[in-house]
Structures are given as C-alpha cells and as structure tokens.
Image: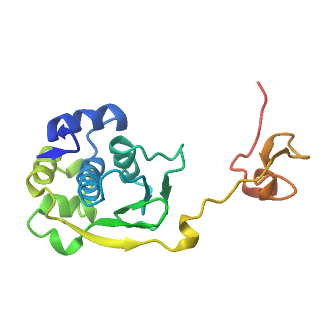
Amino acid sequence: MNIGSHTFDEFVSIVKSFHGHAAPGVLIGGIMVDMALKNLPEGKFFDAVCETTKCLPDAIQLLTPNTIGNGWLKILNFGRYALSLYEKHNGAGVRVFLDPKKLEDWPEIKAWFFKLKPKIEQDSQLLQDQIREAGTRPFTIQGIQLKPEFITKKSRGSIVVCPMCLEAYPINDGAICRACQGEDPYVEHEVY
C-alpha cells in the first residue's frame, strides 16, 4: 500500500519525524489525502479544508503543498474527521471522511476513533496493522462544491500600528488590534 509516493512504512517514518510519533490520526489522514488527490483532475491548483484541528492537518501538510502558513489550508473546527481538496478558482472538488458505519471490521481503529479505550491501553502495533490492512475501505468520498463566499480570498487590508500596544496589525481588524480588543490569550507580558 502506498500513500502518495511513499510506501506505508516510509510514511510511518515521515510521520514520526514530523509529528513526534506514528500518530494513527496522521496515518489515517495520509490515506485520506491520497484518496482525495487521486480523485482530482491532473494539473489543477487546489486548496484544502480540514474539518478538525487534530492530526489531520499534519497529513495534508505532509502530502500536499497546502499549509496553514501559505493560506492554502483552512481548518474548520467542526470536530469531524474529514478533509476536502478543491479547485481553488471554481470550488469543485472532493471530500473524504472516516465513516463510522465502516469501522466494524477494524475494532482497534474503531476503539481509537471513538476513544473506547484509554490511549495507554491501545495496542499501537495492532492499530497500525489495521490501518494498513483497511486501506481505503473505512472512508467515504464525496464530490463537493464550495460556496462562492468561501472561495473568495479576503484581503487583510493595510498594516498599521495599534495605538495601544504599538504592534503592527491589519487595519481590517478595527481601530485597535484584536489582542487589545480582548482576544489576547496572555495574563501578563514581560519584556526581556
């Protein structure tokens, strides 16, 4: 079984190096990304949507040019183990999700996915073996069309200096930066 241009074992090594361990969610995500890529037209530029913040964005970033940093990967925190790849100009593409109805034949994947066992009780080798054995079978793929307003790139506007904190921010965020509007996650700021 290949994931992109990598054997399963090569992808396991890549995941370990990038993610810190052979996370089942990234391995499963690799299969999902590979499925989506195989169902897109050749030679098109595409963007990605990930419907969870957990593990799946790493698989997208490992196997495609779509990253959070370049803006070609949008993460929507719906908590669903799903991703979409779509043509960046017209929004047509495919969505792949881990289908709960298809997990009965792989009890270790099901236990991992539904958190039926604490992580310490999971058999990581059995889980990895079942992911390899299952291949594309636990997933459903759908054709999708994104809403036009989702495809349009929104300009951040000019960059200005916040009159309160004196740091640069996009003017489209308001008269003061979002941190000074109360979105700052810090209790204290200490300059070193």
Q: Position of residue 85 (x, y in %)?
A: 38, 59
State left or right for residue 80 relative to residue 3.
Answer: right
Picture quadrant where residue 109 is located: bottom left
Residue at 25% x, 52% y is 34
Query: What is the residue that sits farthest to the right in this orientation?
Result: 163
Q: Position of residue 65 (x, y in %)?
A: 41, 43
Query: What is the residue that sits farthest to the top in this orientation?
Result: 192
Colour scheme in use: rainbow
112 relative to 62, above or below: below
Residue at 22% x, 38% y is 11
Q: Position of residue 18 (x, y in %)?
A: 36, 34
Quarter of the rendering occupied by the C terminus: top right
Residue at 23% x, 44% y is 4
State left or right for residue 107 relative to residue 49.
Answer: left
Q: Position of residue 174 (x, y in %)?
A: 82, 59
93 relative to 191, above or below: below
Picture quadrant where residue 172 is located: bottom right
Report the number of discs: 0
State left or right for residue 42 relative to residue 47.
Answer: left
